[in-house]
Image: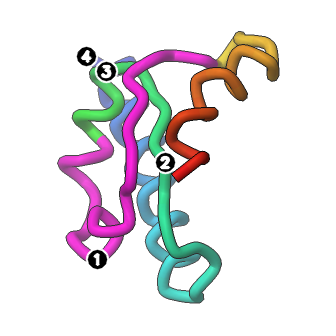
């Protein structure tokens, strides 16, 4: 499926970017928000060093959500 292949390549690009930023010390913890199938792809592609920084996962597609909705979903995980 070409569409699934493109999604997987996009996810790979995101993981590579996050891994580079992690190695640069740009963040200490990572919260993942993505559709459930995308979270699975992220987990599969993440190096262990990056996966160890994941402190929470939110299995929702919030791409078209208003900022207030995103903030509401993040409130609990960011309070820690």
Q: Sort mark 2 into few (<14), some (14-19) or many (20+) by Cα contacts within 10 Å.
A: some
Which numbered marker is on residue 41? none
Measure how far apart labels 2 and 1 are at the Cα level: 14 Å
Measure how far apart labels 4 and 3 are at the Cα level: 19 Å
The image shows residue 17 at horizontal and vertical percentages of: 54, 65
Measure how far apart labels 1 and 4 are at the Cα level: 30 Å
Q: Which residue is mark 1?
A: 49
The image shows residue 72 at horizontal and vertical percentages of: 66, 22
Q: Which residue is mark 2?
A: 31
The reply to whether dot 4 and dot 3 touch (C-beta < 8 Å) is no
Span of residues in magenta: 42-62
Q: Residue at x 49, y 33 (%)?
A: 33
Q: How many marks?
A: 4
Residue 15: quadrant of the picture: bottom left
Above-or-below relation of 52 to 68: below
| Residue 49 covered by magenta stretch | yes
Element carrying mark 1: helix
Of the image marks 1 and 4, the number of the one nearer the N terminus: 4
Q: Which residue is mark 4?
A: 1
Q: Residue at x 48, y 48 (%)?
A: 31
Q: Sort mark 1 into few (<14), some (14-19) or many (20+) by Cα contacts within 10 Å.
A: few
Of the image marks 3 and 1, the number of the one nearer the N terminus: 3
């Amino acid at each position: 499926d070409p569409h699934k292949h493109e999604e997987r390549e996009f996810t790979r690009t995101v993981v590579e970017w996050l891994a580079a930023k992690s190695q640069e010390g740009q963040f200490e913890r990572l919260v993942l928000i993505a559709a459930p199938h995308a979270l699975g792809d992220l987990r599969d592609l993440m190096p262990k060093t990056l996966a160890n920084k994941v402190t929470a996962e939110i299995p929702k597609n919030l791409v078209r959500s208003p900022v207030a909705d995103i903030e509401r979903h993040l409130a609990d995980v960011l309070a820690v």
